[in-house]
């Protein structure tokens, strides 16, 4: 059956250490973030996938300007 085949494939990937592990961002979007996974302590990492790679989202002048626009 299909479900048996899929479960077998999943067990094989787990045994090979290939199962996906989601990471959780413990800090706001920034070039440097604290990231944890599966109950492990958070650690500092570079965030290459962020839309805020320049770190401007938390810049005080931009936050002030955005507040003035609303």
Image (cartoon, rainbow, N blue to C red):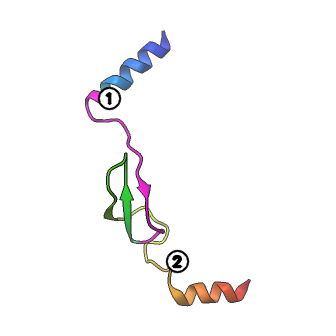
Q: Is residue 46 above or below residue 10?
A: below
Magenta-colored stretch includes residue 68: no
Q: Is residue 70 above or below residue 8?
A: below
Q: What residue is shown at x 67% (from left), y 85% (from top)?
A: 67
Residue 69 quadrant: bottom right
Q: Which mark is residue 13?
A: 1
Mark 1 and mark 2 in contact (Cβ < 8 Å)?
A: no
Point out residue 29 in the picture as x, y percentages from the top left corner.
Answer: 47, 68
Q: What residue is shown at x 38% (from left), y 25% (from top)?
A: 10
Which residues make up the magenta segment? 13-30
Residue closest to the eye, 2 or 39: 39
Secondary structure at badge 1 equals helix
Judge left or right: residue 23 versus residue 45. Answer: right
Q: Is residue 9 above or below residue 24?
A: above
Q: Earlier in the sequence, mark 2 or mark 1?
A: 1
Q: Which mark is residue 57?
A: 2
Magenta-colored stretch includes residue 26: yes
Secondary structure at badge 2 equals loop
Q: What residue is shown at x 32% (from left), y 56% (from top)?
A: 41
Residue 16 quadrant: top left
Q: Residues within 10 Å of mark 2 (few under 14, many from 20)?
A: some
Q: Residues within 10 Å of mark 1 (few under 14, many from 20)?
A: few
């Amino acid at each position: 059956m299909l479900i048996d085949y899929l479960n077998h494939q999943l067990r094989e990937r787990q045994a090979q250490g290939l199962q996906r592990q989601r990471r959780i961002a413990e800090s706001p979007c920034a070039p440097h973030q604290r990231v944890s996974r599966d109950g492990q302590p958070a650690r500092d990492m570079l965030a290459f996938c962020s839309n805020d790679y320049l770190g401007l989202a938390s810049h005080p002048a931009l936050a002030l300007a955005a507040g003035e626009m609303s």
